[in-house]
Image: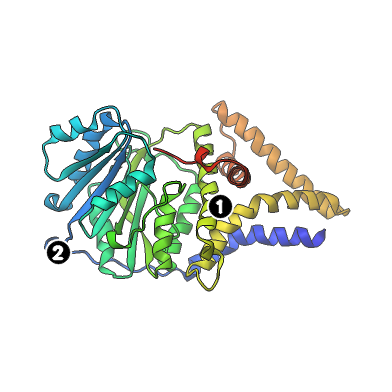
Amino acid sequence: MELMFFICAASFIYSFIGYPLIIGLLARKNGTPDLLHNRLPELTVILCVYNASPLLSFRIKNILESDYPTEKINILVVSDGSTDGPEHIVDSLNNPLVKLIHYSKNQGKSFALNQGLRAVETDLVAFTDIRQRFDKHALMQLSSHFLDPKTAAVTGNLHIITDENNTEDDPGLYWKYEKWIREKESDFKSMLGVTGAIYMARRNLIPEIPTDIILDDMYIPLTMVNAGYHIKFENKAIAYDVSSSTTAEEFHRKVRTLAGNFQLISYMPWLLSPRKNPLFFQFVSHKVMRLIMPYCLIALLVSSYLINTTNFFLLFLLQILFYLYTAIAYIAAINNIKMPFSSVFISFCSLHIASFLAGWKYKFSDTKTLWKKH
């Protein structure tokens, strides 16, 4: 029982302290040269929409306001069975650089992406969603990384804001910690995934996307990694999104994302092979360890109770106090009362509850219940 306790404790310490320290020490930041204006490649921005016509005109205008040469930006709107007339919005713009693909049945985002990618004729393709907007420098900052022939995709920096003046919502210490790890993974070798709201990739390296895939923003980059390429992070390429999720919606998003990691392993078994996965160290340390951590935390609690010594019983009580404090902090937060360290503790616990549920949902539920259409 003591052995189980120490193995789980070591796993916990490695996952949340050891791995971040190691990746931080290994990371080496390289500057990215600026592309000359006349050498900037033509690119296509794919925008998949479903019944989002009220936002469409503004989103297209935002993309065209980029400091990237307008004549080199193509926008491809893929209407995934929309019934609110996106074709009228596109026609009213009367812009030959903006094209529409429309079909009658709502098939889901992966299907829409495949339809759009088949129509892309440029070497670079950028991906975004209808709800966000780009900083005017975003496309330029992303494109600068493609001077390196080994760079297959570049992801940007998503800022959550509270109003139209770009007042940034405090994402909390835990999110800042996660974002720091991802940036250091990019500086070390490569990221494991991208942010679907803002990334750019080489068209010839993007695979056909399985239509039932939960995480297309990990499936695409991991396929590129398997082919020997890198995925990079550009902090200066910014997209803005207004915080709109409820606590329940955010929790469901976590469950869906973590279930998607289980699905990726079933689709890509090479991810668990140290010989075949170029990012095996990062994938196991950052992704797999997080999937097994709920079981480690349960084992820590149970084993510290069953080991009949004073020291272990004190550790058991400390864990009980931590979970009780988090539960009280959560109830307080619902009532707009903020307690010290509440956001960190609540984020930590909700992540691991979501991870626990994700494994069971993926194993015993139909993945269509987790599959996000839009």
Asked whether, in this view, residue 324 is left or right of residue 207, the answer is right
Asked whether 185 or 371 is in front, the reply is 371
Q: In which quarter of the image is residue 105?
A: top left
Colouring mode (rainbow / by chain / secondary structure / one colour): rainbow
Task: Please give the label number shown on residue 153.
Answer: none
Residue 29 position, x and y percent, is 38, 67
Nearest the viewer among 321 and 119 is: 119
The answer to whether residue 348 is visible is yes
The answer to whether one can see residue 16 in this image is no
| Percent x, y of residue 62 | 22, 41
List the residue tagged with mark 1: 262
Sequence-first tag of 1 and 2: 2
**Residue ID at (43%, 67%):** 226
Which residue in the structure is indicated by mark 2?
39
Graded by Cα atoms within 10 Å as few (under 14), some (14 to 19) or many (20 or more), the crowding at tag 2 reads few
Above or below: residue 260 compared with residue 32: above
Establish if 148 lies above or below 243.
below
Given residues 358 and 188, the one toward you in this image is 358
Tell me the amino acid under the disc marked 2: Arg
The residue at 39%/40% (across/down) is 108
